[in-house]
Image (spheres, helix red, strand yellow):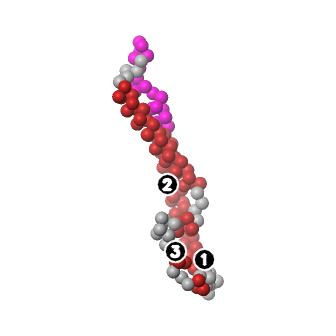
């Protein structure tokens, strides 16, 4: 990730200059954009909550599908109706992939929900 910072280009004796309201450049930026940070925090949390609910539902269905015989079972013998080796392999692989991807997205959305929202964290994604 490329770091883009004003501090790299500013002479060191200008870094701690203060305005008439006794704010440095970073303090002025934080004061001017705190409402924007709150709005971004609220929207990101709402989006992550909604997406995590959907991801958990998909993971639940994938988990249930992994233990269900495709096509049902024969009533007299109890053997699955669709017992072809290639089909069983296909169903197993797709169930594993679906479960892995949905649980990965659940972990990702929960990490978004539990992360602190600070200006320093947002600064890394602006460049």
Look at the image and tell me whether residue 68 can be seen. Answer: yes
**Of label 2 and label 3, which has the lower sequence position?**
3
Q: Residue tagged by mark 1?
A: 27
How many numbered callouts? Answer: 3
**Of label 1 and label 2, which has the lower sequence position?**
1
Q: Give me the residue at 42% from left, 32% from top.
A: 92
Label at residue 16: none
39, 88: nearer the viewer? 88
Query: Which of the 4 quarters of the picture holds residue 21?
Result: bottom right
Q: Give me the residue at 43% from left, 40% from top.
A: 97
Q: Secondary structure at mark 2?
A: helix
Residue 24 sits above or below residue 36 on the image: below
Calculate the distance from the C-alpha at mark 1 to the C-alpha at mark 3: 15 Å
Q: Is residue 114 a member of the stretch shown in magenta? A: no
Query: Which of the 4 quarters of the picture holds residue 76?
Result: top left
Residue range corresponding to the magenta coloring? 60-78
Number of other residues with Cα within 10 Å of mark 2, as a class: few under 14, some 14 to 19, many 20 or more: few
Q: Secondary structure at mark 3?
A: loop
Residue 76 sits above or below residue 71 on the image: above
| Residue 8, x across and y down, in percent | 53, 78
Label at residue 47: 2
Q: Give me the residue at 45% from left, 32% from top.
A: 65
18, 96: nearer the viewer? 96
Q: Residue tagged by mark 3?
A: 5
Residue extending farthest right: 22
Calculate the distance from the C-alpha at mark 1 to the C-alpha at mark 2: 29 Å
| Residue 103, x across and y down, in percent | 50, 43
């Amino acid at each position: 990730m490329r770091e883009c910072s004003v501090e790299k280009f500013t002479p060191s004796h200008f870094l701690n200059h203060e305005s008439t309201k006794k704010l440095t450049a970073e303090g002025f930026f934080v004061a001017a954009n705190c409402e924007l940070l709150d709005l971004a925090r609220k929207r990101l949390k709402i989006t992550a909550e909604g997406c995590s609910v959907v991801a958990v539902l998909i993971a639940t269905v994938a988990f249930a599908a992994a233990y269900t015989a495709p096509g049902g079972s024969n009533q007299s013998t109890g053997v699955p109706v669709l017992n072809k080796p290639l089909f069983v392999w296909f169903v197993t692989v797709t169930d594993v992939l679906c479960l892995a991807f949905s649980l990965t997205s659940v972990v990702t959305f929960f990490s978004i929900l539990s992360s602190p929202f600070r200006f320093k964290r947002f600064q890394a994604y602006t460049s």
